[in-house]
Image (cartoon, coloured by chain):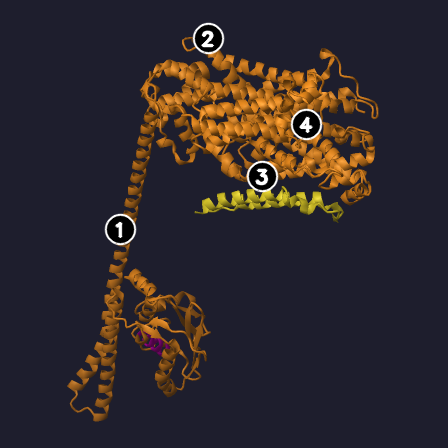
Chain colours: A yellow, B orange
């Protein structure tokens, strides 16, 4: 039961990631502002990336048994 | 500028270190203490994905197009999310069937087809050549950058023999040959190489981070400063945004690049080699699947800052952005840093070349050369002699050939292109494997003809729309057909095929090649019938997780001789290895000697799998078929074998279940027996306790009555006193007998329960009222703290609850001090049930005695100051509470009084109560 859940969660994360990194969600970050001196667009891309790694790590490292 | 001898010396020193690491890895592997058996090393070895392209080319791309370098790393991020599902299946299949390359994988899935294996190998070789060229270009340009004075043009490329790149290619070939083809392994695993690759991944990451930190914090005052300067520059500002100035953002290209990278990270030969073939334990994938993307993130953090920094420092168009990582430190006089960065770049390039060349040479040897050689008289099935040396020689020549082809491409097209564009051509080539690979793993209908037609179409379109234009742009082919189309047909223009416009050349090529590939694969598969062998392989691949080793169906029938199979194995694996292979097999069957091995279908399958590791599935199939007498299988046979196997599986499953249930029954029986024994002992204890308890009042009754019988002249007053004692003792006897009977009834489940919805507050109040007279007589105080609101009823027997309350209250009265004795009763209501607590201010019960008070005939405290009582009240009360699904417990400390509480759950319906009763019975 839980085993299937991890698979389903991975697929969900994958789908969500694909959406986040493509049209039209990508255009959300195309603004002429900076965060801590770093332009928003690169900062946002790297943050999304880091977030996906964090979720993936959480999914993979939590033992489901 | 650094002297060329220093650069060369540093490079050689670095290579020596690599050899040391590899040697150490191999040594430890031979000792059985692998240093690569860790998810971290596995993840680092995956980072062979980051080649010179990442190292130099990403900065160049960022300097031209801003964040467009990123999709190449976002794709792998997305792909690795599914690694645990897709890659694990691939690893399982590859391990089960000893698959050592992509060509083998595809060929094996589609009926061990040699044609498919050759085709895949051909595509790989052609597709990978530009990528090898890229590495050569990066090293030679980096070398030139380091050794030429800053600002001066790089020296012209020498003629063939005077060109240093040629020597770099030769050195890399030699290096790879030593690394990868020292000995032959049936699993094609190279522990030393993996260790070296992981080491290289660390070096390139550290070097790249070093130059990044240098640029951001050494040349500029941190990220803020760098980006502020860039934002102030109208020409640089677009690099930090989505749209590049006047152009719209090319979403299709962005998506295409992500997709391309997603497929490449799995289907590039070197990725397949490190991820699937070199995998030690598939559980490592769990951690590696997030560590590898993390590595990619780290190595990319400084790409944009370095690109922007280089553009700010040198000005746009002044220096080649591909080599900012070298020119920036050099321009600031940090020559050692530049040298270190060059070594990092060397790491990235050599790592890629080593793994790629080993993987491709295995394919070339097993799937292109061997099938051809084995058909000839000299090496064919009837020939004899050890072939292991020949196998190694073929691979060495293949490695050399691949690197020379790479050099050739570099000479022809290398100068015309930036690094990234060259790499993408290779990516698009290996993406053609995706339909056949993924389809083969998940779709049983996909067949050989579909895969073949799909691959041919995809590959042809890739050549026509991507490879040829790349050569045209380098000036080697007349550019006429680019604008006018082949044979002057406008709709055949390679970059606007069939008039499809509006896409860049890469997206255009990827679209047409994959579209044709997938369509052909699906449609042809749907409209043709697979052969028996394909159908059986499809089942084995798609359902790999459902089959355990013991119940693998073996799709083979015929006659074989042990000696023939043994000879065959010796020819391709060598004497020692063959001996080991057969001893292992014999041991697995529980046989002491290899000559007792039955020559059945299982053995044929086993030998074929072992051979497949060394010479590829296609060749192994051919060789085995040549020494045994096979009967042709048809689809019906496949179905029959499958049926038998699944029946066998069902039998073994049923057997397993049966033995499990037997085991369970035995366990239950043993537990029941234990319980009976302890019950028996309890009964004995109980009997002796009861008789003991009965004897005390009986003795006193007898004593007093005898006295009265003997003494006729006893005074009336005295006699009356004695009689009162006798009556009291008789009452006590009666109570005792009643309680024993009660207890026995409850325990045996014969007690009668008259359950109804009880207002527990009313019951407690009634109990308190009825006993308050006794308390008053003894000068004790009794207070009830109940809720003023109406409590929802509880399903229970009111008389029994009354019994419990009276018991607790009379118990408490016995233990409180004679003066100032105080007992409080609390009722607490919660959603799931009601808790009633009786708190006294007696001297309390020590921790170790607390559980004993609930045992029969046990009373806490010293024997001497035990008050009157049967010692059955609390056990009975507890039984009653538990009967209603509740529990009773005691909180107490010596000197702080005792608090007996019980909790009664509010069960949802009578069914639950019935369930509890059933359980108790």
Q: CA distance from mark 1 to mark 3?
A: 54 Å
First in sequence, mark 2 or 3: give its number. 3
Task: Please identify the dominant SS of the magenta region.
Answer: helix
Q: Residue at x 50, y 38 (%)?
A: B85
Going by the image, does B64 lie left or right of B892?
right
Which region is colored magenta?
Answer: B800-810
Residue beneath label 3, please? B78
Please give the chain letter of the residue carrying mark 4: B
* Magenta region includes residue B807: yes
Secondary structure of the residue carrying tag 1 is helix
Identify the disc placed on residue B421.
Answer: 4
Please give the chain letter of the residue carrying mark 2: B
Q: Determine contact: label 2, label 1, CB under 8 Å.
A: no
Observer-side mark, 2 or 1, equals 2
Q: CA distance from mark 3 to mark 4?
A: 22 Å
Query: How many residues crowd mark 4 within 10 Å: few (<14), some (14–19), many (20+)?
Result: some
User: In the rendering, at what x and y percent does residue B434 appear?
Assistant: 53, 30
Spot the residue most to the bottom.
B716
Query: Residue B866 is drawn in which quadrant?
Result: bottom left
């Amino acid at each position: 039961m839980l085993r299937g859940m991890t698979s389903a969660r991975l697929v969900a994360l994958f789908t969500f990631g694909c959406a986040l990194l493509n049209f039209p969600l990508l255009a959300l970050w195309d603004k002429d502002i900076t965060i801590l001196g770093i332009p928003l667009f690169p900062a946002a891309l790297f943050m999304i990336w880091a977030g996906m790694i964090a979720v993936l790590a959480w999914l993979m490292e939590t033992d489901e048994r | 500028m650094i002297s060329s001898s220093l650069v060369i010396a540093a490079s050689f020193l670095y290579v020596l270190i690599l050899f040391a690491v590899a040697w150490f890895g191999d040594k430890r592997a031979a000792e059985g203490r692998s240093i690569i058996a860790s998810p971290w090393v596995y993840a680092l070895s995956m980072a062979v994905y980051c080649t010179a392209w990442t190292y130099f080319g990403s900065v160049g791309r960022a300097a031209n197009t801003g964040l467009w370098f990123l999709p190449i790393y976002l794709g792998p991020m997305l792909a690795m999310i599914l690694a645990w599902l897709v890659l694990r299946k691939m690893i399982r299949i590859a391990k089960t069937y000893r698959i050592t390359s992509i060509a083998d994988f595809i060929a094996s899935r589609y009926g061990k087809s040699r044609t498919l294996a050759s085709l895949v190998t051909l595509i790989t070789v052609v597709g990978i050549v530009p990528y090898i060229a890229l590495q050569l270009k990066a090293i030679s340009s980096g070398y030139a950058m380091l050794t030429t004075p800053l600002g001066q043009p790089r020296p012209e490329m020498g003629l063939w023999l005077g060109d240093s790149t040629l020597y770099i290619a030769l050195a890399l070939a030699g290096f790879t040959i030593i690394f990868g083809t020292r000995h032959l392994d049936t699993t094609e695993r190279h522990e030393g190489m993996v260790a070296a690759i992981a080491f290289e991944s660390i070096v390139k990451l550290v070097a790249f981070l070093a130059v990044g930190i240098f640029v951001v914090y050494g040349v500029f005052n941190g990220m803020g400063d760098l980006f502020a300067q860039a934002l102030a520059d109208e020409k640089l500002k677009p690099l930090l945004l989505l749209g590049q100035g006047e152009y719209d953002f090319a979403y299709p290209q962005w998506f295409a690049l992500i997709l391309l990278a997603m497929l490449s990270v799995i289907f590039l030969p070197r990725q397949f080699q490190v991820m699937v073939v070199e995998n030690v334990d598939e559980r490592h994938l769990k951690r590696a699947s997030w560590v590898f993307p993390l590595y990619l993130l780290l190595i990319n953090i400084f790409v944009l800052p370095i690109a922007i920094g280089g553009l700010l420092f040198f000005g746009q168009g002044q220096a080649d952005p591909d080599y900012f990582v070298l020119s920036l430190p050099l321009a600031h006089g940090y020559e050692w840093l530049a040298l270190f960065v060059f070594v990092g770049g060397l790491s990235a390039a050599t790592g890629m070349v080593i793994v790629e060349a080993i993987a491709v040479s295995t394919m070339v040897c097993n799937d292109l050369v061997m099938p051809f050689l084995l058909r000839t008289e000299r090496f064919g099935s009837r020939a004899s002699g050890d072939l292991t040396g020949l196998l190694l020689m073929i691979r060495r020549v293949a490695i050399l050939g691949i690197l020379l082809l790479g050099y050739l491409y570099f000479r022809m097209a290398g100068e015309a292109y930036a690094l990234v564009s060259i790499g993408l051509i290779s990516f698009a080539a290996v993406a053609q494997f995706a339909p056949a690979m993924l389809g083969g793993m998940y779709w049983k209908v996909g067949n050989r003809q579909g895969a073949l037609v799909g691959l041919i179409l995809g590959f042809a379109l890739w050549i026509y729309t991507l490879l040829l234009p790349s050569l045209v742009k380098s000036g080697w082919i007349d550019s006429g057909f680019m604008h006018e189309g082949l044979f002057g047909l406008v709709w055949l223009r390679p970059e606007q095929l069939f008039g499809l416009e509006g896409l860049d050349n890469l997206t255009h090529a990827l679209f047409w090649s994959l579209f044709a590939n997938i369509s052909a694969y699906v449609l042809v598969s749907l409209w043709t019938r697979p052969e028996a062998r394909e159908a059986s392989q499809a089942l084995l691949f798609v359902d790999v997780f459902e089959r355990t080793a013991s119940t693998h169906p073996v799709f083979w029938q015929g006659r074989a001789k042990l000696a023939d199979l043994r000879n065959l194995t010796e020819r391709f694996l060598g004497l020692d290895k063959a001996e080991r292979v057969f001893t292992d097999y014999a041991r697995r069957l529980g046989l002491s000697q290899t000559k007792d091995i039955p020559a059945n279908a299982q053995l044929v399958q086993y030998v074929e799998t072992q051979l497949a590791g060394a010479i590829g599935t296609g060749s192994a199939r051919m060789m085995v078929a040549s020494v045994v007498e096979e009967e042709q299988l048809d689809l019906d046979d496949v179905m029959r074998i499958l049926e038998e196997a699944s029946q066998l599986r069902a039998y073994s499953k049923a057997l397993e279940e049966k033995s499990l249930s037997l085991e369970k029954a035995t366990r239950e029986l043993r537990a029941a027996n234990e319980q009976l024994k302890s019950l028996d002992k309890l009964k004995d204890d109980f009997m002796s306790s009861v008789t003991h308890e009965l004897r005390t009042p009986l003795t006193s009754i007898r004593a007093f009555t005898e006295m009265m019988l003997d003494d006729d002249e006893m005074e009336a007053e005295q006699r009356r006193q004695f009689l009162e004692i006798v009556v009291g003792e008789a009452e006590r006897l009666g109570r005792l007998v009643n309680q024993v009977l009660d207890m026995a009834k409850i325990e045996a489940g014969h007690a009668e329960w008259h359950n109804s919805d009880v207002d527990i507050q009313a019951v407690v109040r009634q109990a308190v009222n009825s006993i308050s007279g006794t308390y008053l007589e003894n000068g004790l105080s009794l207070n009830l703290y109940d809720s003023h609101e109406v409590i929802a009823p509880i399903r229970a027997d009111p008389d029994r609850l009354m019994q419990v309350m009276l018991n607790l209250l009379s118990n408490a009265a016995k233990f409180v001090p004679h003066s100032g004795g105080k007992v409080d009763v609390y009722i607490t209501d919660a959603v799931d049930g009601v808790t009633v607590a009786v708190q006294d201010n007696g001297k309390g019960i020590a921790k170790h005695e607390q559980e004993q008070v609930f045992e029969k005939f046990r009373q806490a405290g010293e024997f001497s100051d035990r008050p009157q009582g049967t010692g059955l009240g609390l056990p009975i009360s507890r039984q009653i509470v538990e009967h209603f699904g509740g529990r009773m417990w005691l909180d107490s400390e010596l000197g702080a009084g005792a608090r007996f509480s019980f909790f009664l759950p509010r069960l949802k319906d009578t069914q639950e109560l019935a369930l509890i009763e059933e359980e108790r019975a």
